[in-house]
Image (tube, rainbow, N blue to C red):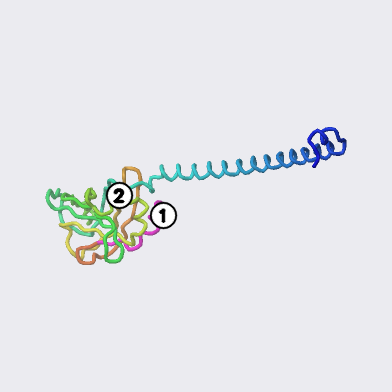
Amino acid sequence: MRKASDVWSDLHSLRTVSAWFQWVSIGLVFLSGLLQVGKYLVDRREKAISAAVSAELINPVAQPIRTASVTIEVIQESSDPLNTHFMDSGGYVAFGRGTDSVMVLSGEQSDARQTGKGEVVWRAVFNMDATDPVVGKTVRSLRGAEFLQIGFGQLPEKSHIIRGSAVVTINSAVRLELPIPEQHMDGDKIFVRDIARFCEVLR
């Protein structure tokens, strides 16, 4: 077995050790480069995910539902000489899916006013109850709703509805405006049958 002093004095051995150190050095430089590239890719991915998470956190449709209100206006074909504020007879607006309600807004007051053109404007502002099951779910969850159902306590059954609108505001940040099409009421109910197009804002 050769002594270290022999290696240190042998030209061939010194060249071999030098070459070995050179290759190790090159390997380490190459490995360092790979590690730097890997770090760059990981950092870039981390920043992209962080930005996406931050954007989602501030996205209003990703927030839990806390409050909701609707301003509803329905135009009824009628010559009734109404100009009345109903203190104890309001109505409701319900987002529905199948036979289930997704979110309900209601109130105890409403207004009816004859325009003089054979039309009565029914108007009200309804709010969501703080105990509604939708509270705490994300605003985006309302995408599952299939229709809107509306009722006014004093609006006669089977009335002819000329037009109308429902403007829903959620968390004072998300606004949905749904037109009410012309129809004959289904008993005491008004329907907006297809609301998917108007819920696109919730995506």
Q: Residue at image x 19%, y 55%?
A: 91
- The magenta-colored residue range is 190-203
Mark 1 neighbour density, 10 Å: few (under 14) some (14–19) many (20 or more): few
Task: Give the x, y percent position of residue 61.
Answer: 38, 48
Task: Give the x, y percent position of residue 97.
Answer: 31, 63
Mark number for residue 136? Answer: 2
Residue to which mark 1 is pinned: 200
- Quadrant that contains the N terminus: top right
Is residue 171 located in the magenta-colored stretch of the structure? no
Q: Is residue 202 left or right of residue 32?
A: left
Q: Residue at image x 78%, y 38%?
A: 22
Question: Which residue is more in the foreground, 190 or 184?
Answer: 190
Q: Secondary structure at mark 2?
A: loop
Task: Give the x, y percent position of residue 186.
Answer: 23, 66
Q: Is residue 200 left or right of residue 39?
A: left
The amino acid type, in three-letter code, at marker 1 is: Glu
Task: Give the x, y percent position of residue 158.
Answer: 20, 65
Question: Which residue is more in the foreground, 46 or 89?
Answer: 46
The amino acid type, in three-letter code, at marker 2 is: Gly
Task: For residue 197, say whether it is visible.
Answer: yes
Contact check, label 2 and label 1, Cβ < 8 Å: no
